[in-house]
Image: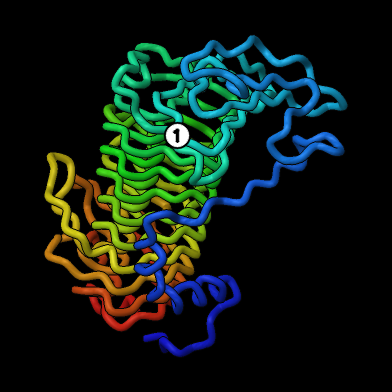
Amino acid sequence: MTSLFAPARPRIRLAAVLFATAATVPALLGATTPAPFTVDKSPLLAPGHAPGAAVPGTTVPGAAAAPGAAVPGPAAPGSAGRPNVHHLAPGASVQAAVDAARPGDVVELAAGTFPGSVTLATDGVTLRGQGNRTVLVPDPADRSACAAAGNGLCVTGVADDRGMPVRPVSGAVVESLAVAGFPKSGIAAAVTDRLTVHEVSSHDNGLQGISVEMSTRTVLTDNEARDNGQAGIFVANWFDRKGGALETRGTQVAGNRLTDNRIGLQLRRVRDLTAIGNLAYGNCGGIFVVGDDGVPRAGSLTVSDNVVRANNRYCAPNPRLDAVQGTGILLTGTEDVVVSDNQVADHSGTSPMSGGIVLYPSVVGAPNARAVITGNMLSDNQPADIADLDQDTGSSFTNNACRTSQPAGHC
């Protein structure tokens, strides 16, 4: 057994500091109004212009408009290579501004509440708010397709009848805003390439906080996803279809705070992805990597340097998954997954998947294959810090600092 007091390896020293201070997390998460994100708008400002002032070569839809007023047409071309910036005040139509935007444009929302769902389907458009002070909420009168699907912000490309991408939305950016209270997902992205979602708070939605399906080269960083009905962040081939795992071509999920969801982070039927430096706390389960018998299999991805603690809520079973309670990191039906340098602690529950790092057969009985579990620090997880419920599938367990394992010998 590796000593729990052995010197921390260089890659996990920062995570160890976070882990040591994680007892303060409940107080931080209990705040009713999280501190707003800081947004540097200096690249969008001409010399002598204060933040919020109109920039030459932009339109200002809603700057002096009554609620429901029409948004002017596309912004005039910017100068000196600057993007066109469409400024919106509360009451203006976000959808009209997004529809008017051209590739490279920025739609910037002022602080305030913006009712209604929004569909972003133009390459290279940025939708930006003022952190938690800018909130997209449902509008009962909204009859758009995105609203009818129950989602808040839809970033949607074109797929064929089999769900295969035909024309992805490329290079869209969503940053520094909140999406709350939608029946399904706060952000629902499907058939995208190089989508960035950064410093977004997605909370109190019925399904996923941030959902990304059939998309490649996605970057999800520094977001908060809390109090959502299913996953805080969900990355998959499709939510409602089976099939082989999607090659995401290097999707990154990094630095996100995932709390009080059913699952903090769920990676389902995907490959070639990195999940690094995330905090998963207070969910039913922390980080789940999920596959089945589809080919190619889910896997060939890395889960590294995350802090996963006290995910002990109880979530009832559903047709695809047993009850979830007290699971830190779960691999089920995957291959060639590396789980390294994570901090996993304080899990307990009555689920057959309870434990710190758990390898568990999939719903169709497919075991994990060739998992690499290395360099993790685990403590106070019940019934075991590491539970290999597959056994004899070529997985390896090395240099983990823990006290208990099933079977014995993995610590």
Q: Quadrant of the C terminus?
A: bottom left
Picture mark count = 1
Q: Quadrant of the N terminus?
A: bottom left
Label 1: how many Cα within 10 Å (few below 14, some 14–19, many 20+):
some
Where residue 235 appears, as percent x and y from the top left, is 40, 40
The image quarter in which residue 402 lies: bottom left
Q: Is residue 11 above or below residue 41?
A: below
What's the colour scheme?
rainbow
Where residue 80 appears, as percent x and y from the top left, is 87, 27
The image quarter in which residue 239 lies: top left
Can residue 298 be spotted in the picture?
no
Which residue is rendered at x = 39% and y = 48% of the image?
A: 225
Where residue 374 appears, as percent x and y from the top left, is 44, 69
Q: Is residue 218 above or below residue 103?
A: below
Residue closest to the eye, 199 or 365: 199
**Helix, strand or loop at disc 1?**
strand
Q: Is residue 407 above or below residue 257?
A: below
Q: Is residue 21 left or right of residue 314?
A: right
Which residue is rendered at x = 33% and y = 76% of the image?
A: 410
Which residue is rendered at x = 31% and y = 83% of the image?
A: 403
Residue closest to the eye, 15 or 359: 15
Q: Is residue 368 left or right of residue 133?
A: left
Q: Is residue 200 above or below residue 192?
A: below
**Residue bearing the label numbered 1:** 113
Which residue is rendered at x = 78% and y = 36% of the image?
A: 45
Residue closest to the eye, 351 or 182: 182
Where residue 186 appears, as percent x and y from the top left, is 38, 35
Residue closest to the eye, 364 or 173: 173
Q: Amino acid at mark 1?
A: Thr
Q: Is residue 306 left or right of residue 63?
A: left
Can residue 300 be spotted in the picture?
yes
